[in-house]
Structures are given as structure tokens and as C-alpha cells.
């Protein structure tokens, strides 16, 4: 799937990283209660040294329940294998960006998502997503803040992101996606908490964490066809956004997979950290797919490439 015939010839391009505004950095630091003023840019590592631990009985209890009830439903060998494959695909995203527009409707982005689908299917088989809905707290500003704070302070999760090619700015962007989007995340309601009287059959709505992971993977899978069909409209900025948001979503999935692996195998994470990894992973996948929709799939007159017709 990674041959030139599938991915096209390499091309020079602008840096695909997204710029983080000073306002977003300041908001993140304030949201997480950074204890000291710093003139340096706000980064994950910087925050880890400025945030005080804040033990959360809610996160701890949820993590303990997940670990106790779900560990036996998970196959550690499968999870570790597919997590490693996902890591390899994340590391090769620069090659996807070098491709530019895919030269056919089934190509690099679809290949990137393959290990994620196998992780998704394994978790779905054991009704893992249903139990997460029943166990994890709903997204609220307080829960999101505690999640982001615990994520910053969890060295194994930070190291895992380092290992798959997330630099400080990209890791900080993941934090911002979690901490600074409370209103957006609050709209994503667990399936067992959807109020009565809505205009659709709530029994057919998948669990929240399944919606987030499956939705992210579906958007990534659709990128090859979308970019291929709309080549005349696509700019370098759109291609940058496609790769950046794909990396964000896969980074969120990687956090969730890391937590699942820990439950099934090593037990290195605390119960609080397990909860934070699942919640943060889901939050990042939600924000990433919504940003991808608006920046890549909605090509407007303002963002499209200039017409070649005179």
C-alpha cells in the first residue's frame, strides 16, 4: 500500500504542522492552573513542570472499574500488535504528505487507518465501548480539566507520543484539543444519557467512545477519494490540514490503545491515568474529525485553489 504506484511521486511542500496561537497557549496554561508565569512558549513539557498534581477520586474509581471488569475481555497480544502497527503508520505520515493528492480513490490514507480499524473491531467485540459509556464521566468542563491535567503529568503517555513522532508543538496541540474545547465536547453525549424526546431512535446510537473512534477512522478512510475527486480545488494548505488532523486523530486513537494495552498487559498506568488516557483519546478524536470536516471536506470559494480557466 505504500508503493509509488499507490502513493504517487514525492513532491516538495510546506511544513504540515499547524501553528498554535499565543491565545490558545495562554488559555491552556490558565485552564490547567499553571503555577508560574513563563515567557517561554507553552508546551507539554513546560506545563508538566508547572502543574500541581490534583488527585481525582472520580478518575481513579472509573479506571479501577474499567480495569477490573474489562481486562479479561481484551487480548493483550492483539492490542500490542495493532498498536505497534498504528505507531508505524503514524510515523510514516510525512510520506503521505509528500504524496500530495492521492492518485486513486483507495490509497495512503486508507492504509494509514488499517491498524486503527483492527483495534476498533477488537474493542467492539467485547462490548468495551458500552462499558466505557457506563463507567467514564460525561464530558464537562471540570472533567475535561482533570483529564488534561492528568494527561500532562503521565510520563508513559508523553513518552509514547514521543516514540511515534509527536514533537512538543504537536503534543501541545493535542492538549489544546482536550482542554480548550469544553463546549464542543459537551455536545457529545454518552448513548445512555441522550434525553427523551429527540428526533431519532436512541437505541441505534452507538456508544460515545465507539462513535468517536469509528467516526475518526471513517473520515480518514474517506480522504483518498475526497482529495482525488477534488484535485482541482485542493491547495497545499488543505493537504497540510488533512495530514495534521489525521495525525491528531490517530494520536488520540493511540492514547486509547495505550490505555487498553495497559489494562490487558503491563499495568504501568494508575487507575487515574487509564481514565485520563481513554477520555483524552476520545476527546482528541472528536475534535480532530470536526476540524477535518471544516478544513478539508468543506472546500469553499475562499479556500479552494484558483481556477485555471481564464
Image (tube, rainbow, N blue to C red):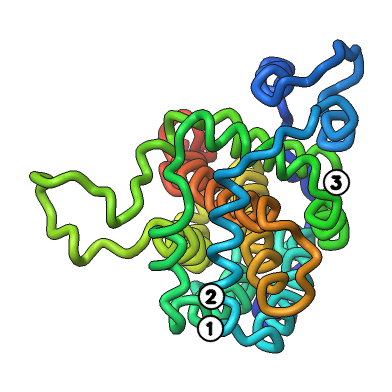
Please report the residue visible at 45 percent of the width from the left and 59 percent of the height from the top. Answer: 209
- The residue identified by callout 1 is 73
Question: How would you rate the neighbour count of disc 3 (Cα within 10 Å): few for under 14, some for 14-19, many for 20 or more?
Answer: some
Residue 194 numbered tag: none
Q: Is residue 258 above or below residue 120?
A: above
Q: Position of residue 56 (x, y in %)?
A: 63, 40
Asked if residue 304 lies left or right of residue 153, the reply is left
Q: Position of residue 30 (x, y in %)?
A: 69, 17
Asked if residue 28 lies left or right of residue 284, the reply is right
Disc 3 versus disc 1: distance between alpha carbons?
A: 34 Å
Q: Nearer the viewer, mark 3 or mark 1?
A: 1
Name the quadrant containing residue 214.
bottom left
Q: Is residue 29 above or below residue 243?
A: above
- The residue identified by callout 2 is 70
What secondary structure is marked by label 1?
helix
Please report the residue visible at 46 percent of the width from the left and 46 percent of the height from the top. Answer: 137
Q: Position of residue 5 (x, y in %)?
A: 68, 81
What secondary structure is marked by label 3?
loop
Pick the residue in front: 72 or 147.
72
Contact check, label 1 and label 2, Cβ < 8 Å:
yes
**In this rendering, does residue 8 appear at all?**
no
Name the N-terminal-most of marks 3 and 1: 1
Contact check, label 2 and label 3, Cβ < 8 Å:
no
Please report the residue visible at 32 percent of the width from the left and 64 percent of the height from the top. Answer: 206
Pick the residue in front: 30 or 302.
30
Quarter of the picture containing the N terminus is bottom right
- The residue identified by callout 3 is 167
Name the quadrant containing residue 144.
top right
**In this rendering, does residue 18 appear at all?**
yes
Amino acid at each position: 500500500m505504500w508503493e509509488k504506484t499507490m502513493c504517487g511521486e514525492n513532491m516538495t511542500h510546506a511544513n504540515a504542522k499547524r501553528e498554535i496561537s499565543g491565545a490558545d497557549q495562554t488559555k491552556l496554561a490558565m485552564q490547567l492552573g499553571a503555577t508560574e508565569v513563563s515567557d517561554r512558549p507553552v508546551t507539554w513539557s513546560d506545563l508538566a513542570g508547572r502543574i500541581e498534581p490534583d488527585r481525582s477520586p472520580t478518575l481513579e474509581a472509573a479506571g479501577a472499574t474499567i480495569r477490573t471488569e474489562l481486562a479479561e475481555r481484551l487480548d493483550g497480544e492483539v492490542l500490542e500488535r495493532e498498536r505497534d502497527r498504528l505507531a508505524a503508520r503514524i510515523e510514516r505520515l510525512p510520506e503521505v504528505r509528500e504524496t500530495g493528492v492521492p492518485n486513486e480513490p483507495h490509497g495512503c490514507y486508507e492504509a494509514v487507518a488499517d491498524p486503527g480499524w483492527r483495534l476498533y473491531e477488537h474493542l467492539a467485540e467485547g462490548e468495551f465501548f458500552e462499558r466505557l459509556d457506563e463507567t467514564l464521566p460525561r464530558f464537562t468542563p471540570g472533567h475535561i480539566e482533570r483529564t488534561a491535567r492528568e494527561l500532562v503529568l503521565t510520563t508513559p503517555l508523553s513518552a509514547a507520543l514521543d516514540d511515534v513522532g509527536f514533537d512538543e508543538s504537536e503534543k501541545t496541540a493535542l492538549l489544546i484539543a482536550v482542554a480548550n474545547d469544553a463546549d464542543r465536547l459537551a455536545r457529545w453525549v454518552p448513548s445512555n444519557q441522550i434525553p427523551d424526546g429527540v428526533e431519532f431512535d436512541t437505541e441505534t446510537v452507538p456508544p460515545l467512545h465507539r462513535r468517536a473512534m469509528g467516526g475518526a477512522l471513517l473520515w480518514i478512510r474517506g480522504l483518498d477519494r475526497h482529495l482525488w475527486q477534488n484535485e482541482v480545488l485542493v491547495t497545499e494548505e488543505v493537504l497540510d490540514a488533512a495530514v495534521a488532523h489525521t495525525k491528531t486523530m490517530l494520536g488520540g486513537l493511540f492514547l486509547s490503545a495505550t490505555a487498553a494495552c495497559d489494562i490487558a498487559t503491563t499495568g504501568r498506568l494508575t487507575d487515574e491515568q487509564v481514565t485520563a488516557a481513554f477520555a483524552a483519546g476520545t476527546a482528541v478524536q472528536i475534535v480532530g474529525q470536526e476540524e477535518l470536516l471544516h478544513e478539508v471536506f468543506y472546500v469553499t470559494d475562499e479556500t479552494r485553489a484558483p481556477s485555471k480557466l481564464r
